[in-house]
Amino acid sequence: YPLASPARPPLEQFPDISILQFSVPQLTMYPSLHPHMIPKRVLLVLAVILELDTEQLMIFFVVPAIIVLAVIIILASGYLKAPPDVAYVISGVRKKPRILVGQAGLRIPFFERVDKLALGAIQIDVKTKTAVPTAEYINVKVDSTVSVRVGKEPEMIALGAQNFLNVNRETIAQKINDLLEGNIREIVGQMKLTEMVSDRKAFSDRVQSNVVPDLAKFGLELVSFNVQNFSDEGGVIDN
């Protein structure tokens, strides 16, 4: 319709029609718009400045906005925050995995995966399953409590990840129980019964010195080792 045409229909006849359904020349006939169309006048101005029609304007602004929104959603889904007692191992894109401990980070969805490594202390009750002969050939059994954990150094965490990734503490305890028992049996065979019973600290120190290098191969470090009890079938200790 021409701008001054008496045949121009009143805008009130189109209360539910979006402004984007009008062409730019038609919209110039309506200096005042319905209230729900007012925010879209900005798009109209931009369309005039950029010499775009409404369809081109939608493509120019809406499509990039959708792309940006999709990128934000994907990045948000890749946000991670690792607790202090768990290491998040992120791998998939880089040759060397990234490790998060007690901090936040991002992973690339669909291209990177996240695995977990328990870092907290693990309590293990280690008992010799059968009697062990001492240096004096007296068969004894040892009951002890051991506490281990994955080392805090990056190299130790990397070794721990190779051996115990996505493994709970109970399973880790079962896997290293035999290693700990073997070290205890070795030290028992090197000492006299009187030495072990009268000086438990000396026995504990020797076990710790013996077991630390073996644990380090798995990325573990010894927190504590305590002897609970010595026993023998012949009753030598009680006598």
Image (cartoon, helix red, strand yellow):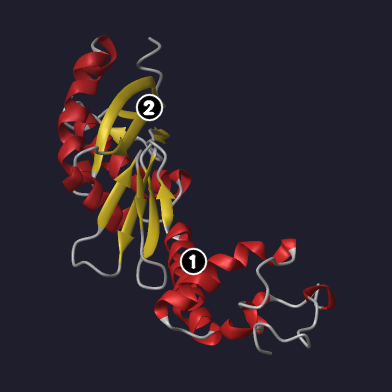
Q: CA distance from mark 2 to mark 1?
A: 58 Å
The residue that mark 2 highlights is: 144
Q: Is residue 20 above or below residue 202?
A: below
Residue at horizontal 42%, vertical 39%?
83
Which image quadrant is residue 181 in?
A: top left
Which image quadrant is residue 151 in?
A: top left
Instruction: Confirm whether residue 153 shows in the render.
Output: yes
As rendered, which of 85 and 229 lies closer to the eye? 85
Instruction: Name the amino acid type tagged 2.
Output: Ser
Q: Is residue 9 above or below residue 187?
A: below
At which x and y percent is residue 200? 26, 15
Crowd band around label 1 with a 10 angstrom C-alpha radius: few (<14), some (14–19), many (20+): few
Instruction: Confirm whether residue 142 shows in the render.
Output: no
Where, quadrant-wise, is the N terminus in this rendering? bottom right
Which image quadrant is residue 211 in?
A: top left
Residue at horizontal 34%, vertical 41%?
103
Residue at horizontal 18%, vertical 67%?
95
As rendered, which of 170 and 208 lies closer to the eye? 170
As rendered, which of 67 and 221 lies closer to the eye? 67
Where, quadrant-wise, is the C terminus in this rendering? top left
At which x and y percent is residue 182? 27, 42
Nearer the N terminus, badge 2 or badge 1?
Answer: 1
Residue at horizontal 76%, vertical 84%?
8
**Which of the two marks, 2 or 1, is nearer to us in this view?**
1
SS at circle 2: strand
Q: Is residue 110 above or below residue 167?
A: below
Q: Mark on residue 55?
A: none
At which x and y percent is residue 190? 16, 30
Instruction: Name the amino acid type tagged 1.
Output: Leu
The residue that mark 1 highlights is: 69
How many labels were placed on the picture? 2
